[in-house]
Amino acid sequence: MTSPRIVLFGATGFTGRLTAEALLARGARPVLAGRDPARLEALASSLPVELPTAVADVGRPATIRRIVEPGGVLISTVGPFARWGEPAVEAAIEAGGVYLDSTGEPAFIRRIFQRYGPAAAASGATLLTAFGHDYAPGNLAAELALRKAGPAAVRVDVGYFTQGDMLRRASAGTRASALGMVLEPMYGFREGRILREHGRTRIFSVNGRRRHALSVGASEHFALPRTHVGLREVNVYLGWFGGLTKAAAALARATPFIAAIPGAKRVTEAIADRVIHTAGRDASPGESGEEIATQVVAEAFDRDGERLASIELHGGDPYDFTARLLAWGAITAGTDGVDAQGAVGPVEAFGLESLVRGCDQAGLHAIA
């Protein structure tokens, strides 16, 4: 019995190339897919092992459907996902396969769970969105904190932090996705349901330092309440902004008013396109000048606001981690299968113990 083949869509981008290398390092032989045959050939010829290639373009969805076999595994690194991500999702659903992506875009994550989840469940497909540094680590840390806290926990807060110049390190694709998120509504999970929110902030203690962070929509809001039915509140925060957190929060609160301006969304999309095109066809993220490290914190609380448990996960470069985790997830799904269908979180798909091993192999470790 052979494992389903793995298709890597968006292979010629920065994250795509890292993922191709991570798959090869684990012994997989994926199909490299993208819209530019010349770039695909250049990538394939640069790798130590000959890999098949396939031309697929989001502007021609049939080209994506053709390369996803029934029950196959599809990895997508094609962003900004809110603009270009849906054809790959639809192809995976039609094939009844397993879909993983590298998005960190809140609007797209919400779309996967709310719009595409039911169709995926009906076809037997599994959708694992945001299966990288955004936002698998928070799902894992929160799950560990909630299990440590026990049934009294009704709230969990997750914070993502970096050491090093992550803003400079960010790739053109990440910058474009971030620009696309500017006018999108954020959300949280409070009072047992998804609610719109803008500009919440919190201070965490990380390695003995006070770190400011801004709320963001993520996959934790959808996945964690399903594995912990007593949860009434899930909050996810990004701590990448440092001293600019207050300014970023003010901008977030102004988002509904800015988005109402005619043509505002077209302007942000045009700027995002320019970011991608001026970065160069083979551009890599900028060098930050220092090593990038990541910390993910999860804290569980009871009804009175008393903290019951706290978990920290530490790792290295977010791009390397994302590529390694996507490779681990795709191979594990293909060989061992997944535990749930529809739009699911990483713990639902693989189980806690397996996910701990996968994240550990990808370079993210729990700190006692």
Image (cartoon, grey):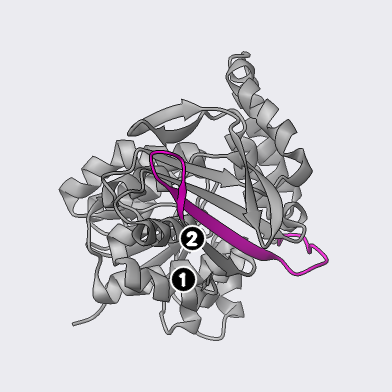
Q: Earlier in the sequence, mark 1 or mark 2?
A: 2
- Front residue of 163/265: it is 163
Label 1, residues with CA under 10 Å away: few <14, some 14-19, many ≥20: many
Magenta stretch contains residue 291: yes
Q: Position of residue 255 (x, y in %)?
A: 61, 23
Q: Which residues are magenta?
A: 283-308
Give the residue at x 54% y 48%: 79
Q: Is residue 12 visible?
A: no
Q: Give coordinates of residue 83: x percent, y percent.
A: 50, 38
The image shows a total of numbered marks equal to 2
Q: Amino acid at mark 1?
A: Cys
Give the farthest residue toward the right. Answer: 289
Q: Position of residue 75 (x, y in %)?
A: 42, 61
Residue type at mark 2? Pro
**Corner quadrant of residue 118:** top left
Instruction: Please tell me which residue lies in front, 125 or 346.
Output: 346
Q: Residue at x 37, y 61 (%)?
A: 74
**Residue 225 vertical placement versus 142 (above, below):** above
Q: Is residue 348 left or right of residue 85?
A: left
Q: Are marks 1 and 2 in contact (CB under 8 Å)?
A: yes
Quote the CA–CA distance across marks 1 and 2.
8 Å
- Mark 2 sits on what residue? 137
SS assignment at label 2 = helix
- Assess whether residue 323 is covered by the magenta stretch: no
- Position of 71 with respect to 25 (left or right) is left
Q: Secondary structure at mark 1?
A: helix
Give the residue displayed 25% in from the left and 75% down from the top.
336
- The mark found on residue 359 in the picture is 1
